[in-house]
Amino acid sequence: MINTIIFDFNGTMFFDGRIQKESWGEFLKEEFTRIMTESEFEKHVAGRNNRDTLEYYSGRKISDEELEVLTNKKEQIYRDMCLSRPKEFHLVDGLTDFLSVCLKNGIKLNIATASERPNVEFFFKHLDLEKWFDVESVSLNDGTLPGKPAPDMFLRAIENIDSSPYNSAIFEDSVSGIQAANSANVGKVILVEDPDLDVVNMPSNLRADEAIQNYFRVSETLMKRK
Protein backbone atom coordinates (compact mmCIF):
# COMPACT_ATOMS: atom_id res chain seq x y z
CA MET A 1 0.00 0.00 0.00
CA ILE A 2 1.28 3.45 -0.93
CA ASN A 3 1.34 5.67 2.15
CA THR A 4 3.98 8.19 1.05
CA ILE A 5 4.28 10.51 -1.94
CA ILE A 6 7.53 12.22 -2.88
CA PHE A 7 7.49 15.02 -5.45
CA ASP A 8 10.25 16.44 -7.50
CA PHE A 9 9.37 20.14 -7.59
CA ASN A 10 10.29 21.84 -10.84
CA GLY A 11 8.26 20.51 -13.75
CA THR A 12 6.18 18.32 -11.44
CA MET A 13 4.51 20.64 -8.94
CA PHE A 14 5.22 23.82 -10.89
CA PHE A 15 5.39 23.78 -14.70
CA ASP A 16 8.42 25.99 -15.09
CA GLY A 17 10.01 24.34 -18.14
CA ARG A 18 9.90 27.48 -20.26
CA ILE A 19 11.20 29.65 -17.43
CA GLN A 20 13.97 27.16 -16.70
CA LYS A 21 15.02 27.05 -20.34
CA GLU A 22 14.94 30.81 -20.75
CA SER A 23 16.78 31.54 -17.50
CA TRP A 24 19.46 28.94 -18.22
CA GLY A 25 19.72 30.16 -21.81
CA GLU A 26 20.18 33.78 -20.70
CA PHE A 27 22.70 32.82 -18.02
CA LEU A 28 24.79 30.51 -20.23
CA LYS A 29 24.92 33.07 -23.01
CA GLU A 30 26.12 35.77 -20.61
CA GLU A 31 28.53 33.62 -18.60
CA PHE A 32 29.94 31.12 -21.10
CA THR A 33 28.83 32.54 -24.49
CA ARG A 34 27.15 29.19 -25.07
CA ILE A 35 23.82 28.48 -26.77
CA MET A 36 21.95 25.66 -25.00
CA THR A 37 20.39 23.04 -27.30
CA GLU A 38 17.22 21.09 -26.55
CA SER A 39 19.25 17.90 -26.25
CA GLU A 40 21.63 19.54 -23.78
CA PHE A 41 18.71 20.78 -21.70
CA GLU A 42 17.29 17.25 -21.38
CA LYS A 43 20.64 15.58 -20.70
CA HIS A 44 22.59 18.15 -18.71
CA VAL A 45 20.08 20.57 -17.16
CA ALA A 46 16.64 19.04 -16.46
CA GLY A 47 16.73 17.24 -13.13
CA ARG A 48 20.46 17.84 -12.65
CA ASN A 49 22.05 19.82 -9.86
CA ASN A 50 23.81 23.06 -10.71
CA ARG A 51 27.31 21.68 -10.22
CA ASP A 52 26.74 18.99 -12.86
CA THR A 53 25.35 21.52 -15.32
CA LEU A 54 27.98 24.20 -14.72
CA GLU A 55 30.89 21.76 -14.94
CA TYR A 56 29.49 20.43 -18.21
CA TYR A 57 29.32 23.90 -19.77
CA SER A 58 32.62 25.11 -18.32
CA GLY A 59 34.36 21.89 -19.26
CA ARG A 60 36.20 21.72 -15.93
CA LYS A 61 35.82 21.18 -12.23
CA ILE A 62 34.66 24.26 -10.35
CA SER A 63 35.37 25.20 -6.76
CA ASP A 64 32.69 25.48 -4.09
CA GLU A 65 33.19 29.25 -4.02
CA GLU A 66 32.75 29.60 -7.78
CA LEU A 67 29.75 27.28 -7.67
CA GLU A 68 28.06 29.53 -5.11
CA VAL A 69 28.70 32.68 -7.15
CA LEU A 70 27.48 31.17 -10.44
CA THR A 71 24.48 29.50 -8.83
CA ASN A 72 23.37 32.72 -7.15
CA LYS A 73 23.64 34.58 -10.46
CA LYS A 74 21.66 31.99 -12.40
CA GLU A 75 18.98 31.48 -9.75
CA GLN A 76 18.40 35.20 -9.37
CA ILE A 77 17.61 35.34 -13.09
CA TYR A 78 15.22 32.41 -12.59
CA ARG A 79 13.45 33.89 -9.54
CA ASP A 80 13.05 37.27 -11.25
CA MET A 81 11.44 35.53 -14.23
CA CYS A 82 9.05 33.64 -11.94
CA LEU A 83 7.87 36.80 -10.21
CA SER A 84 7.47 38.64 -13.52
CA ARG A 85 5.10 35.94 -14.84
CA PRO A 86 2.24 35.47 -12.36
CA LYS A 87 0.12 33.66 -14.95
CA GLU A 88 2.78 30.92 -15.07
CA PHE A 89 4.06 31.01 -11.48
CA HIS A 90 1.55 28.75 -9.73
CA LEU A 91 1.16 25.11 -8.72
CA VAL A 92 -0.01 22.63 -11.36
CA ASP A 93 -3.77 22.53 -11.85
CA GLY A 94 -5.53 20.32 -9.32
CA LEU A 95 -2.46 19.87 -7.14
CA THR A 96 -3.60 21.86 -4.10
CA ASP A 97 -6.78 19.79 -3.74
CA PHE A 98 -4.82 16.57 -4.29
CA LEU A 99 -2.32 17.48 -1.57
CA SER A 100 -5.09 18.28 0.88
CA VAL A 101 -6.83 14.97 0.13
CA CYS A 102 -3.55 13.14 0.71
CA LEU A 103 -3.10 14.72 4.13
CA LYS A 104 -6.72 14.03 5.05
CA ASN A 105 -6.14 10.36 4.25
CA GLY A 106 -2.92 10.10 6.21
CA ILE A 107 -0.59 10.07 3.19
CA LYS A 108 2.89 11.38 4.04
CA LEU A 109 4.22 14.08 1.71
CA ASN A 110 7.71 15.35 0.94
CA ILE A 111 9.80 16.97 -1.80
CA ALA A 112 13.13 15.90 -3.30
CA THR A 113 14.56 18.63 -5.49
CA ALA A 114 17.83 19.55 -7.18
CA SER A 115 17.17 23.17 -6.12
CA GLU A 116 19.32 24.81 -3.46
CA ARG A 117 17.82 26.08 -0.20
CA PRO A 118 17.29 29.71 -1.34
CA ASN A 119 15.05 28.50 -4.18
CA VAL A 120 13.20 26.09 -1.89
CA GLU A 121 12.53 28.92 0.57
CA PHE A 122 11.43 31.11 -2.37
CA PHE A 123 8.89 28.47 -3.43
CA PHE A 124 7.63 27.97 0.12
CA LYS A 125 7.15 31.72 0.54
CA HIS A 126 5.36 32.44 -2.73
CA LEU A 127 3.43 29.19 -3.25
CA ASP A 128 2.30 28.54 0.37
CA LEU A 129 3.89 25.10 0.45
CA GLU A 130 3.95 25.07 4.26
CA LYS A 131 0.25 24.09 4.12
CA TRP A 132 1.32 20.59 3.08
CA PHE A 133 5.08 20.24 3.59
CA ASP A 134 7.72 20.78 6.28
CA VAL A 135 10.60 22.72 4.75
CA GLU A 136 13.04 21.12 7.20
CA SER A 137 12.17 17.64 5.87
CA VAL A 138 12.72 18.53 2.21
CA SER A 139 15.60 16.74 0.49
CA LEU A 140 17.38 19.48 -1.41
CA ASN A 141 20.71 20.19 -3.05
CA ASP A 142 22.96 20.95 -0.09
CA GLY A 143 26.12 19.53 -1.68
CA THR A 144 26.16 16.37 0.45
CA LEU A 145 24.44 14.00 -2.00
CA PRO A 146 25.00 13.07 -5.63
CA GLY A 147 22.42 14.52 -7.98
CA LYS A 148 19.90 12.57 -10.02
CA PRO A 149 20.03 10.02 -11.67
CA ALA A 150 21.47 8.75 -8.39
CA PRO A 151 18.56 7.81 -6.08
CA ASP A 152 20.03 9.39 -2.95
CA MET A 153 17.88 12.53 -2.88
CA PHE A 154 14.68 10.49 -3.07
CA LEU A 155 15.89 8.03 -0.44
CA ARG A 156 16.71 10.91 1.92
CA ALA A 157 13.28 12.47 1.35
CA ILE A 158 11.66 9.15 2.23
CA GLU A 159 13.87 8.64 5.29
CA ASN A 160 13.23 12.20 6.51
CA ILE A 161 9.53 11.41 6.99
CA ASP A 162 10.08 7.91 8.42
CA SER A 163 8.80 5.95 5.46
CA SER A 164 10.17 3.26 3.12
CA PRO A 165 10.71 3.05 -0.66
CA TYR A 166 8.36 0.06 -0.90
CA ASN A 167 5.43 2.18 0.31
CA SER A 168 6.33 5.32 -1.65
CA ALA A 169 5.25 6.85 -4.94
CA ILE A 170 7.50 9.32 -6.75
CA PHE A 171 6.22 12.04 -9.10
CA GLU A 172 8.86 13.12 -11.63
CA ASP A 173 9.14 14.87 -14.99
CA SER A 174 12.70 14.36 -16.25
CA VAL A 175 14.62 11.38 -17.58
CA SER A 176 17.26 11.69 -14.86
CA GLY A 177 14.51 11.90 -12.23
CA ILE A 178 12.71 8.82 -13.53
CA GLN A 179 16.06 7.00 -13.55
CA ALA A 180 16.57 8.00 -9.92
CA ALA A 181 13.06 6.87 -8.98
CA ASN A 182 13.67 3.51 -10.67
CA SER A 183 16.97 3.09 -8.84
CA ALA A 184 15.25 3.87 -5.54
CA ASN A 185 12.99 0.82 -6.10
CA VAL A 186 9.85 2.63 -4.99
CA GLY A 187 6.35 1.23 -5.19
CA LYS A 188 5.09 3.65 -7.86
CA VAL A 189 6.72 5.95 -10.43
CA ILE A 190 4.53 8.64 -11.95
CA LEU A 191 5.61 10.70 -14.96
CA VAL A 192 4.27 14.27 -14.94
CA GLU A 193 4.09 15.90 -18.38
CA ASP A 194 3.84 19.62 -19.06
CA PRO A 195 1.19 19.92 -21.82
CA ASP A 196 2.88 23.08 -23.13
CA LEU A 197 6.22 21.34 -23.75
CA ASP A 198 7.36 18.59 -26.08
CA VAL A 199 6.91 15.07 -24.72
CA VAL A 200 10.04 13.89 -22.93
CA ASN A 201 11.90 11.17 -24.85
CA MET A 202 11.77 8.53 -22.12
CA PRO A 203 14.00 5.45 -22.62
CA SER A 204 11.99 2.25 -22.97
CA ASN A 205 13.93 0.52 -20.21
CA LEU A 206 12.66 2.94 -17.55
CA ARG A 207 9.50 2.23 -15.54
CA ALA A 208 6.75 4.81 -15.32
CA ASP A 209 3.50 3.32 -14.00
CA GLU A 210 1.33 6.23 -15.08
CA ALA A 211 1.59 9.57 -16.89
CA ILE A 212 -0.42 12.65 -15.93
CA GLN A 213 -0.64 16.29 -17.05
CA ASN A 214 -2.60 17.62 -14.07
CA TYR A 215 -3.85 16.42 -10.70
CA PHE A 216 -7.61 16.65 -11.26
CA ARG A 217 -8.05 12.97 -11.99
CA VAL A 218 -5.13 11.29 -10.35
CA SER A 219 -6.43 7.73 -10.12
CA GLU A 220 -6.90 5.87 -6.86
CA THR A 221 -4.42 3.30 -8.13
CA LEU A 222 -1.65 5.73 -7.16
CA MET A 223 -2.41 4.88 -3.55
CA LYS A 224 -2.06 1.15 -4.16
CA ARG A 225 0.99 -0.87 -4.97
CA LYS A 226 0.57 -3.08 -8.04
Image (spheres, rainbow, N blue to C red):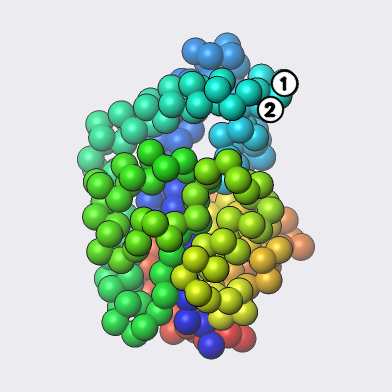
Q: Identify the residue at horizontal 72%, vertical 21% (top origin).
A: 60
Query: Which quadrant holds the C terminus?
Result: bottom right
Question: Which disc is residue 159 wearing?
Answer: none
- Looking at the image, residue 11 sits to the left or right of residue 64; the answer is left
For this rendering, which residue is in front, 129 or 27? 129
Q: Position of residue 120 (x, y in %)?
A: 38, 46
Q: Residue furthest right?
A: 205
Q: Quadrant of residue 217?
A: bottom left
Give the residue at mark 2.
56
For this rendering, which residue is in front, 74 or 156? 156
Q: Is residue 192 visible?
A: no
Placement of 37 over or under 213, stated as above or below: above
Q: Secondary structure at mark 1?
A: loop
Q: Is residue 145 visible?
A: yes
Q: Position of residue 52 (x, y in %)?
A: 65, 35
Packing grade of label 1 (10 A; few <14, some 14-19, many >=20) is few
Q: Secondary structure at mark 2?
A: helix
Q: Position of residue 30 (x, y in %)?
A: 49, 13
Q: Identify the residue at horizontal 52%, vertical 43% (top origin).
A: 142
Q: Quadrant of residue 33?
A: top right
Placement of 13 over or under 223, stated as above or below: above
Q: Amino acid at mark 1?
A: Gly
Q: CA distance from mark 1 to mark 2?
A: 5 Å
Q: Quadrant of residue 59?
A: top right
Q: Identify the residue at horizontal 67%, vertical 51% (top origin).
A: 149
For this rendering, which residue is in front, 93 or 71? 71
Give the residue at mark 1.
59
The answer to whether the residue labelled 1 contacts the one labelled 2, judged by CB atoms less than 8 Å apart, is: yes
Q: Amino acid at mark 2?
A: Tyr
Packing grade of label 2 (10 A; few <14, some 14-19, many >=20) is some
- Looking at the image, residue 70 sits to the left or right of residue 133; the answer is right
Q: Position of residue 175 (x, y in %)?
A: 64, 52
